[in-house]
Image (cartoon, rainbow, N blue to C red):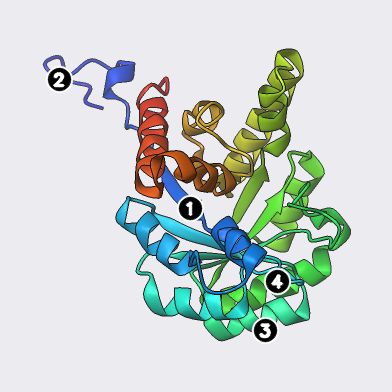
Amino acid sequence: MTTNATGPRATGLDATPPPRLRLGVNIDHVATLRNARGGLSPDPVRAALLAQDAGADGITAHLREDRRHIIDSDIDRLMATITVPLNFEMAATAEMQAIALRHRPHAGCLGPERREERTTEGGLDVAADTNRLRTVCMQLADAGSRPSLFIGHDARQIEAALRVGAPVVEFHVGLYCDLMAEGRQDEAAEELAALQRAIRDAHGAGIEVHCGHGISYETVAPFAAMPEVRELNIGHFLIGEAVFRGLGPAIAEMRRLMDAARVQTPS
């Protein structure tokens, strides 16, 4: 901003625009389809390459303990094939830690895992396990992988993430998305307000903020509009939408909605 009489006035239009919002595409559920029947098709690595060509800034893959979708050979091939960053979602177990340290993906996102859940139903309880998670984060960082924590919007978890030393948190926004899909507008508004407070608190504490889980065309705008949010990770919705319009066009539409919301962010 200039301060002389002939320079531009200090208006909102002169403010630095928010940084470009990154889109990470989760290809887990291409593997779910493959595993439902067995064999090699559809190939999640091919989906990752299509997503990359369609403008995805990164690929997310979650290697679960029971290998319900992504399997070890998928991670091998993703590391050897894609040219955008791989966000390796993982439980904080010795097995997953060893795999991450062997592959050294761009990022290792630590989240909860329960065999009985169909998908990740909540955030990691960092506050209950700070010493162990601090060690895992340090080892990932030493190997060149950026550690992140998949958490809910509880202030205790943000404080614990700071104690652990994680440079990134990804907020679980699934409840908001579910409430919107069910038409429960008042409850959704309360949940969104809580998420927005947590996002601003984490950003204010120096943590990079990502959001993920359940985001659709109808629910992406509030998160894309927040300049504190640097990345959205979206998977199941895009893979489902690809059935009807193709993966590339599905991603392109999400990118368009993200960019439109970002442009309208107030200064």
Residue sitting at x 70%, y 71%: 67
Placement of the N terminus among the 4 image quadrants: top left
Q: Quadrant location of residue 262?
A: top left
Residue type beneath disc 4? Arg
Residue sitting at x 42%, y 37%: 254
* Nearer-N-terminus badge (3/4): 4
Residue type beneath disc 3? Ala
Residue type beneath disc 1? Val
Residue type beneath disc 2? Gly
Q: Secondary structure at mark 1?
A: strand
- 16 shown above or below 240: above
* Nearer-N-terminus badge (2/1): 2
Instruction: Return the mark for residue 5.
Output: none
Read off the residue under disc 2: 7
Q: Nearer the viewer, mark 2 or mark 4?
A: 4
Q: Nearer the viewer, mark 2 or mark 1?
A: 1
Read off the residue under disc 3: 98
